[in-house]
Image (cartoon, helix red, strand yellow):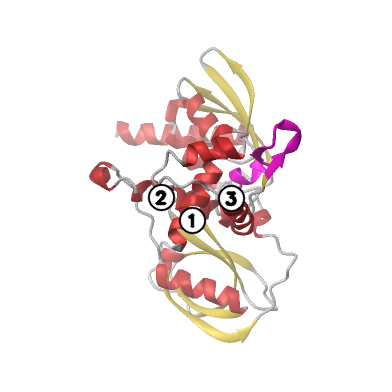
């Protein structure tokens, strides 16, 4: 069987069990036979078990069996489906691809958002990570008339945020400064043969854990932020939280309060400002003052 067809079966199995909660193998088979993938052939227990093993290896998802509940299968570690991991990203991407491939008859009615691939430089960066070698980069920051001089850097990890790819890099010793590059501003990138040491205890996921996006300004302390959302914005924030730490702490008729703990850096201003009068910052006061001042400046601009 072709790899893509197998991926489709893996995705179908995960989504079916996740959606239904708990299913016996017989119930899984009943649903399987309703799909075009089955071609009328039942899912053998041996095939099912091989799929379970492959899903664990590729995506880290454990499909377990509860013998006390009538030998029903369920996803043991559902929390991984909400993590920002490469496995979950792969699962989501393959799932969407599977849906689209079965929807060619209406493809003109499915509109997608373009995400720049930055393919060649992204490929080189990841190749350098795998080989543990430094890269040489020519880079131009926004507002700069000319590019920075060629920099030799240690490639640490990549991150996708707001339809852009970023790379965390480090200057070699003795500077050892870590900072973020935007791939769309890289003018040239070369992979060298010079080795560097990547410490295995470094935590890429933890590096931006207290950040809204890709800004990690140590001068801005981590603190509790509380915002009040009005009307339909309450539902939007419930469905798409601004930060992984977000939780709803109060609800009333017409509004709800949401609390999160992060560094409220300048990039965090944008999602607050974009919501206009649908969101109000309750604390900290300095952030409320900052957002208010920006709104007032915009009003003055329109009054000119």
Closer to the eye: label 1 or 3: 3
Instruction: Look at the image and tell me whether residue 262 can be seen.
Output: no
The question of residue 68 being in magenta is answered with yes
Disc 3 to disc 2, how far (Cα)? Answer: 19 Å
- Dot 1 falls on a residue whose secondary structure is helix
Residue pictured at 60% horizontal, 28% vertical = 258
Mark 3 surroundings: few (<14), some (14-19) or many (≥20) residues within 10 A? some
Q: Which residues are magenta?
A: 64-85
Residue 165 shown left or right of residue 53 in the figure = left
**Residue 28 percent coordinates (x, y):** 55, 39
Disc 1 to disc 3, how far (Cα)? Answer: 13 Å
Q: Which residue is mark 2?
A: 98
**Residue 255 percent coordinates (x, y):** 53, 18
- Please say if 247 is above or below 138: above
Q: Nearer the viewer, residue 36 or 270?
A: 36
Q: Which mark is residue 264?
A: none
- Dot 2 falls on a residue whose secondary structure is helix
Q: Earlier in the sequence, mark 3 or mark 2?
A: 3
Q: Which residue is mark 3?
A: 48
- Please say if 304 is above or below 110: above
Q: Which mark is residue 7?
A: 1
């Amino acid at each position: 069987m072709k790899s893509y067809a197998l991926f489709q079966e893996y995705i179908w199995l995960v989504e079916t069990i996740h959606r239904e909660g708990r299913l016996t193998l017989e119930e899984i088979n009943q649903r399987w036979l309703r799909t075009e993938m089955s071609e009328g052939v039942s899912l053998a227990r041996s095939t099912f078990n091989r799929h379970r093993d492959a899903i664990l290896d590729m995506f880290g998802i454990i499909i377990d069996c509860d013998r006390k509940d009538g030998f029903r299968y369920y996803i043991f570690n559902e929390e991984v489906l909400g993590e920002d991991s490469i496995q979950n990203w792969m699962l989501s991407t393959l799932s969407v691809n599977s849906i689209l491939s079965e929807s060619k008859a209406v493809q003109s009615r499915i509109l997608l958002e373009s995400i720049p691939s930055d393919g060649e430089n992204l490929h080189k960066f990841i190749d350098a990570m795998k080989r543990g070698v430094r890269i040489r980069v020519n880079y131009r920051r926004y507002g700069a008339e000319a590019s920075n001089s060629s920099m030799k850097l240690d490639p640490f990890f990549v991150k996708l945020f707001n339809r852009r790819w970023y790379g965390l890099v480090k200057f070699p010793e003795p500077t050892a400064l870590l900072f973020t590059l935007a791939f769309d501003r890289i003018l040239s990138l070369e992979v060298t043969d010079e080795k560097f040491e990547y410490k295995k205890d470094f935590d890429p996921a933890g590096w931006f854990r207290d950040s809204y996006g890709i800004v990690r300004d140590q001068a801005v302390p981590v603190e509790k932020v509380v915002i009040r959302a009005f009307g339909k914005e309450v539902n939007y924030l419930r469905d798409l939280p601004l930060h992984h730490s977000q939780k709803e702490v109060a609800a009333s008729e017409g509004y709800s309060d949401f609390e999160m703990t992060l560094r409220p850096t300048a990039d965090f201003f944008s999602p607050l400002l974009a919501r206009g009068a649908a969101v109000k910052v309750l604390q900290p006061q300095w952030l409320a003052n900052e957002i208010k001042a920006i709104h007032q400046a915009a009003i003055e601009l329109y009054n000119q």
